[in-house]
Amino acid sequence: MYKRYTSYLVGAFFLLVSCSKDIYVDSCHYEHYSTKIDSSKSTNKVLIIGIDGFRSDAMTEQISPKIHSLFTQNNTYNNLEHKTEEDTYSGPNWSSILTGVHLNKHNVIDNTFEGGNFIKYPSFFKYIEEHVPELNTASFVNWGPINKNVLSKEVDYAQDLENDSLVFQKSIELLENTNPFDVDIFFIHFDELDAAGHNFGFSKNINEYTETITKLDYYVEKLYDIISNKRKTGENWLFIVVSDHGGDGTGHGDYDNIHIRNTIFLIEHPDTFFKNNHTSNMTDIAPTILSFIGIQSAEFSCKKDGISLIKQYSTTNNQQKR
Ligand SMILES: [Zn+2]
């Protein structure tokens, strides 16, 4: 009797929880909402460089000189205490980076992506393709599940590549040779730092880990040089470097460990002011990107958890450059 009463109570509790969750989700009646496009921003471009497993205290001048120098620039948002999701696996965190919502919404709780709700909470690429389809979008990754589960149906050109060197080479080719197209919004993912962490240890005292950072730092430098040159021809690029989690020992499962839950995040643009007082988390990246390219979607605004980190966007400078 007691047992039955308890299970009734438990059942009622879950009913209540699921009801309130449904009410919350249903409050976004996006089909009635409109989307405003700021056409003066529709030709803007974004490069997002994802580096898997970058522990913040390993981002030093000695180990990663280029990224370090970008972190000291004024025209950046930068944060070495960029917060992971409470679930510190890669799956949930890349999902939050791409969708702008926390894991209680996108529902990815591990690296299987099972149960992921990308229909209701699509990536920022989906909003771009829906509202400004003429933009060319691409995703090159060395961790297949990102494309397989999230991006392959949402970008114009998705490539799964076998190692970071290939990701780098193919990215250079796409950016420089514009083959098969002149890319506008480009997501790149490097995975070998995470592998070095799992095999040898996530630490600035482990050579295999720091040497991998230094190699990736060189990739970032070359990619940044290409973006700099494109800016000189009048193209208006936002440059982003982000990681999904840090690490300690040879793992990254414990959110209570500061070396795991804090990671690196950088946005750079020649003449944009950023909200540097705000402590960023994974859900701030998608709103920032959509804001930069002038897509104001009421659907996204209702669903998103993060904020745009752009404080003031200087259009005057931009027009002068063109
Ligand atoms: Zn990992």
Image: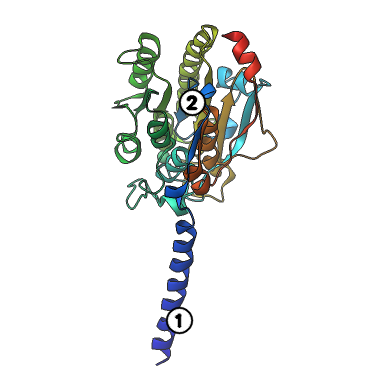
**Amino acid type, label 2:** Asn
Q: Is residue 73 above or below residue 126?
A: above
Q: Is residue 6 above or below residue 87?
A: below
Total tally of numbered discs in the picture: 2
Classify residue 154 as left or right of residue 312: left
**Looking at the image, is mark 1 or mark 2 nearer the viewer?**
1
Label of residue 213 in the image: none
Inspect this view and state whether residue 282 appears: yes
Q: Quadrant of ligand 1?
A: top left
Q: What residue sits right under mark 2 in the picture?
A: 207
Q: CA distance from mark 1 to mark 2?
A: 55 Å
**Quarter of the rendering occupied by the N terminus:** bottom left
Q: From the Cβ of disc 1, is ligand 1 less than 8 Å away? A: no
**Amino acid type, label 1:** Leu
Front residue of 67/258: it is: 67
Residue displayed at 50% across by 25% down: 210
Number of residues whose C-alpha sits closer than 10 Å to that of mark 2, classed few (under 14), some (14–19) or many (20 or more): some
Quadrant in the rendering for residue 4: bottom left
Quadrant in the rendering for residue 58: top right
Label of residue 9 in the image: 1
Front residue of 83/58: it is: 83
Kind of element beneath mark 1: helix
The percent coordinates of residue 206 (x first, y second) are 50, 30
Classify residue 139 as left or right of residue 103: left
Q: From the Cβ of disc 2, is ligand 1 less than 8 Å away? A: no
The percent coordinates of residue 166 (x first, y second) are 33, 19
Residue displayed at 32% across by 51% down: 114
Kind of element beneath mark 2: helix
Inspect this view and state whether residue 61 appears: no
The percent coordinates of residue 16 (x first, y second) are 47, 72
